[in-house]
Structure formats: C-alpha cells, structure tokens
Image (cartoon, rainbow, N blue to C red):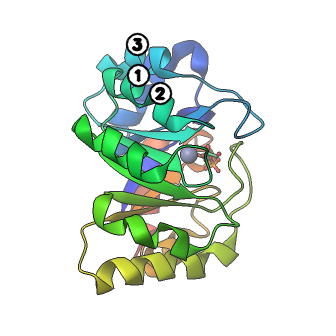
Amino acid sequence: MLIAPSLLSCDFSKFGSEIERMDKAGADYMHLDVMDGHFVPNLTFGAPVIKYVRPFTKKVFDVHLMISEPLRYIDDFCDAGADLITFHIESDSDPEKTIEKIKSRGVKAGIVLKPKTPAEAVFPYLDRIDMVLIMTVEPGFGGQSFMADMLPKIEAVRSEIDKRGLDVLVEADGGIGDQNISLCAKAGVDVAVAGTAVFKAEDPAKAIKVLKELAI
Ligand code: DX5
Ligand code: ZN
C-alpha cells in the first residue's frame, strides 16, 4: 500500500518544511487538495502555491482538484509540477477533453468519484486513465469519518480494472486510519490518502509505518 499524506492537515505557515517532514517520514505521494469554494464549500490553494513547494521533495505530487472547471486550469497545474492530476467526474468539464489535456502534458490522469456517484460512472474512461480516486467522505474537509459503505464501490472498480487487465491504480481518500486501512487494502486500494491520521500523530514516520503494516 502506498501512503499519500494529505497536506490539507499541515501547518500552512511552513508548507515547504511540512512537505520535507512528510518526505522524511516515508510518504510515497504528496496529496495536494485544491478547492475552489464552489465545487466544494471550502478554499485552499492553487497552482502558484504548488509551484513554490514543488522543490521541497522529489516525491510524486498527487493533485486532487475539487474545482468546478478543471479543464481550464490543467496547464497551470502541469506547469506547477504536478505528476498526477485527479479531477471529479461531477465537475463541469468534459471528462474526455480533460483526460486528453492532462495526458498531452505527459502527466498522469485520474478520475474522482464522490460518495453518491456509482462505480459505473468511471467505467467508460478506465482504458484512458492512470487512477480512480474513490472518496470515502464528502469532499471539502479533513477530519471526517470514513464511510465504510464505499467499500463495495472500491471492490467494483477494482474488479472491473482487473477483469479488463488494465494498469490503473485505485486510491481512496477520507477518514483513513489504523481502524480501516486493512478494509481498504482488502477491497483493492493501492494508494491510501491520510490527513489527520498522519499529521495528528506524534510521530508521522511511525504512523505511516503502522498504516503500511496494517494494510494487508
Ligand atoms: C477531503 C480531502 C482529503 C482529506 C483527507 O476533501 O480530499 O484529502 O484532506 O483528510 P483526512 O484523512 O483527515 O480525512
Ligand atoms: Zn483529497
């Protein structure tokens, strides 16, 4: 299991050193939550901030766009140094065009499903994407409770990917911690996002190690 700490829970007054701290703690990806106050009822940061913190690690920048018009900003996030961009299928942008745009920049593309969106919504795009991100909370805020009723959806996406023999990662995001990471692993998650579980831990390196050990 790969662990992607969500920087949404970091101390933004030292964003760069928080990324270095996660790098040293053994994070596999840096999960960067971009919110526009429109698609979700919260605001975070955009491409200029990501560009400033890019030099603090060589780890994968996993950029989760919770914005209404992702297509409009893909170039900005690619220029800022994103390695992987995930956008919501529920956004206003055309999924085909958005995938194409991300791929044309040599960046990996993924589709995100909100809790109410069924697994089947992503099936038509599976052969063109690198990741499916399944939300296990309503997007917008860190620190919410894991929705165990999303596990069948994770299994459905995983089995469709495997049935078709595709090379697509499954990521889960929201409320993931020691209590449920094993359920995520069993359902077929490859990458677990963890905000609170890592940032609120006294020792983030230990928290990441324990999460990985439990994910079997
Ligand atoms: C929620 C974000 C998540 C969130 C995860 O909209 O996409 O990445 O920050 O934080 P925790 O692990 O605290 O739920
Ligand atoms: Zn996220």
Residue sitting at 31 percent across and 81 percent down?
Answer: 162
Taking the view exactly as shown, the residue that stands out farthest to the right is: 41
Disc number lying in front (3 or 2) = 2
Say whether disc 3 or disc 1 marks the residue closer to the N-terminus.
3
Q: On residue 52, which mark appears?
A: 3
Q: Please say if the residues under marks 3 and 1 sit with CB atoms less than 8 Å apart.
A: no
Q: Would you say the beta carbon of the disc 1 residue lies within 8 angstroms of ligand 2?
A: no
Residue 108 in picture, x, y percent from top left: 29, 46
Inspect the image, locate mark 2, and give the three-letter code of the amino acid beneath it: Tyr
**Which residue occupies 70% across, 67% down?**
116
In the rendered image, which quarter contains the N terminus?
bottom left
Give whichever of 98, 204 is nearer the camera.
98
Label ID, residue 76? 1
Residue at mark 3 to residue at mark 1: CA–CA distance:
13 Å
Tell me which label, 3 or 2, sits earlier in the chain. Answer: 3
The answer to whether residue 62 shows anywhere in this view is: yes
Query: The residue tagged with tag 2: helix, strand or loop?
Result: helix
Q: Are marks 1 and 2 in contact (CB under 8 Å)?
A: yes
Q: Amino acid at mark 1?
A: Asp
As displayed, is residue 107 above or below residue 36?
below
Residue 179 image position (x, y, % from top left): 62, 69
Residue 98 vs residue 81: left or right?
right
Q: Nearer the viewer, residue 179 or 186?
A: 186
Q: Which residue is mark 2?
A: 73
Residue at horizontal 62%, vertical 55%? 174
Mark 1: few, some, or many residues within 10 Å (few <14, many ≥20)? some
Quadrant in which residue 151 is drawn: bottom right
User: Which residue is pictured at 71% across the width and 47% down the height?
Assistant: 143
Q: Residues within 10 Å of mark 2 (few under 14, many from 20)?
A: some
Marks 3 and 2, how far apart in space? 17 Å
66 up-or-down from 50: above or below:
below
